[in-house]
Structures are given as structure tokens and as C-alpha cells.
Image (tube, grey):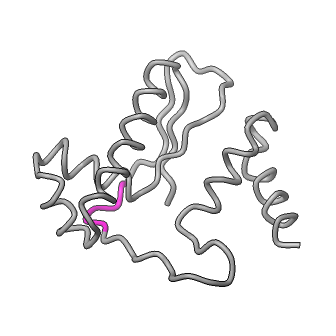
Amino acid sequence: MHVNLMCEYAQKLYKPYGSKNIREVQKLLRRRHRRGPRGRMPKPVMLGVRPSITKFFPYPQSNQAPIYLEPAELEALRLVDLEGLSQEDAGERMKISRGTVWRLLQSARRKVAQALTEGRPLFINP
């Protein structure tokens, strides 16, 4: 039943862009959640700044599927690339490990590069 509700929610969320990449939205909705009834919950990530702008659109606009950027990915990108902190310092500030910062950076850089080169909209999840 949980999967059906998630699928309906993903379809509603993704309706303006068609049903081509519903799997991507479903994957997004499952991120940073415990898989199944066992195991520990993910550690909370400390975010320094909440972005005031959450959507970027290319010009001219196209009807391609958007790319979703997590707030933790944006924060890691801001700390390391914009403020010039090392990954260890960024991890201390976000209260996560250096390896997690590295993973968030790789994912954020890949998504931003893909949005820029393919001309796709970039959405930052609240």
C-alpha cells in the first residue's frame, strides 16, 4: 500500500512534466529514509542557509524533465565551492562525515552540470 501511495504522490508531483521519469521522482521521495523496519535512521544534516530561490529555468524553456537538488547537496556545494572550506571542515559544520560530504558534492556537481549542459530546469527541494 505504501508503494501505491508513493506512486500516486509522485504522479501528482510530476504531472506537469509527463510520466517519463516517474522513477526518478520516486527515488527522490525515498532518499534519506530508513529502508524497511530495521536499521538506524539517517543523521540529520545541519543546513546553514535556506535558499530563497528554489527553481531555475533555462532560456529558452523546454519541456524536459527537471533535475531535483537536495538541500544537503546544495549546502555541501556552497560550503566547499563557494566558501572554499575543505571537505573535513564542511563535514564538521554540517555535522556529518567527510565521506558523506564527498558523496553529496559528487551528486550536486553532476546534477548542476547535467542541468546546464542539457538545458533542463533545476529544482531545489524545500
Place of residue 77 in the rendered image (x, y in percent of width and height, measured from the top left)? 28, 47
**Count of marks overlaid on the render:** 0
Q: Main secondary structure of the magenta part?
A: loop
31 over 55 or under it: above or below: below
* Residue that appears at 64% across and 62% down: 30
In this orientation, which residue lies closer to the viewer: 70 or 104? Answer: 104
Place of residue 50 in the rendered image (x, y in percent of width and height, measured from the top left)? 34, 61
User: Which picture quadrant has residue 18?
Assistant: top right
What span is colored magenta in the figure?
47-51
* Residue that appears at 15% across and 60% down: 88
Q: Is residue 50 magenta?
A: yes
Place of residue 101 in the rendered image (x, y in percent of width and height, measured from the top left)? 29, 56
37 over 124 or under it: above or below: below
Query: Is residue 8 found left or right of 66 in the rendered image?
Result: right
Place of residue 55 in the rendered image (x, y in percent of width and height, measured from the top left)? 49, 42
Image quarter hosting the N terminus = bottom right
100 over 64 or under it: above or below: below
User: Which residue in the rendered view is the most extreme toward the top?
Assistant: 60
User: Which picture quadrant has residue 92?
Assistant: bottom left
User: Which picture quadrant has residue 45?
Assistant: bottom left
